[in-house]
Amino acid sequence: MANNFNSTYRIIDKLRRSDSNEKADQHSRTYLISNQNEQNEANYILRLINLENLTNLSEFITDISWYKQFNHFNLMSLKDCFLIDTKLNLVKPYASFGSCADLLNSNPFGVCERLIAHIIWQTLQAIRYLQDRHILHRGIASKNIYVCDDGRVLLDEFSHCISMISPFDGKLRKQIFDYTDKLKDQLLYLAPEIIYQNSDGYNLKSDVYSLGMVACELANGSNSYRNMTYGNLNILYAKIQGSEPILLDGTQLTDEMIGLCDSSNSSYIEEIKKRKYTKEFHSFIKSCVSTCLESRCSLDELQSHAFFKFQKRLSRDRNSLHCDMVSLLETYKKKRPINKEINHLEETSCNFPTNDYNEKRNLTWEF
């Protein structure tokens, strides 16, 4: 197989995701490769996983099985999968802009509203495809949404996927109660009802919350809960208390928020003062990130939301839709990734309720 690999693929460069960590890099490497047998030597991403260092292979087996089941324009596909010695090789399409996390690494103040609408609209189509098959993704995050230079958006990472159909009796469940240790990696984006781990469970609307979190992050430049004092504990407390992320623009910035920031945030504050998001965008975020599961919008309701009026008008002409997105991406193509030196307003960019409704909920998440 090694000879076949060398005759088919050529390694161009080693890649490192902007959100990667040393622990993850111990078990896998990511490379940009080209297929020498294809015209113009099309580029792909190779993820090489050392199985020798892993004690649990079930997650990779499950992940690969999901790829085989899915076939949608906005879902990441698996072009090739093979073993060389103890190395598992996964070959996927190449997204030249990387993930939305990479896009934000180059644009720490956030990206424009129109581009966000394009990205979220296409991600929404992928989620609808999954939920039409009664599948909950549970891994929707900026690091798992990829942007291609042709305007195509791809949702990846299926290791958290779970079916709403019971594996015991084959019946469709209204709620599920599955909690795995791996879900803690998604804490920034997880819906409150998943974190609660109570008898109410959660359902397909939990993915809507995560989608709203990504949209808000793309606008603000950072996740509202990132870098909170005391880390995960404060995130859990904030969500269980009913905090809801908001879009930071001139209409939302208060003197209290400005007072909590130091001088290093001055350029970011000025950026917030200058921008003003549409009322449709504010409404969309609020519809997604409601801490109350019952009041959160369904996917059908989001599909018809006024925030997507431009996308809906061109939805029957995919080429026109992608051409508009490509023109927007040109602005960001020239920018190189930079290090964030901005301490965003994470703890102040959330709405905290004043009532004690959420104080009655019990938190049982174990670290």
Image (tube, grey):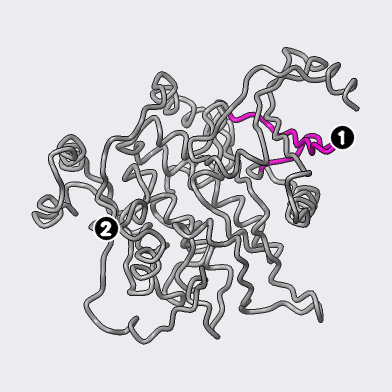
The residue depicted at 34 percent of the width and 38 percent of the height is 110
Point out the tag, 2 or 1, that comes first from the N-terminus. 1
Identify residue type, mark 1. Asp
Give 40 or 65, whichever is nearer the viewer: 65
For the residues labelled 2 and 1, the Cα–Cα distance comes to: 48 Å
**Segment colored magenta:** 76-95
The residue depicted at 64 percent of the width and 58 percent of the height is 160
Please tell me whether mark 1 sits on a helix, a strand or a loop: loop
Which residue is denoted by mark 2 in the rendering? 347
Which residue is denoted by mark 1 in the rendering? 85
Q: Residues within 10 Å of mark 1 (few under 14, many from 20)?
A: few
Percent coordinates x, y for residue 228 in the rendering:
32, 56
Q: Which corner quadrant holds the N terminus?
A: top right
Give 188 or 281, whichever is nearer the viewer: 188
Identify residue type, mark 2. Glu
Give 64 or 278, whichever is nearer the viewer: 64
Q: In the orientation shown, which residue stands out farthest toward the top?
A: 40
Q: Is residue 42 left or right of residue 114?
A: right
Percent coordinates x, y for residue 286 in the rendering:
35, 62
Percent coordinates x, y for residue 326 in the rendering:
49, 27
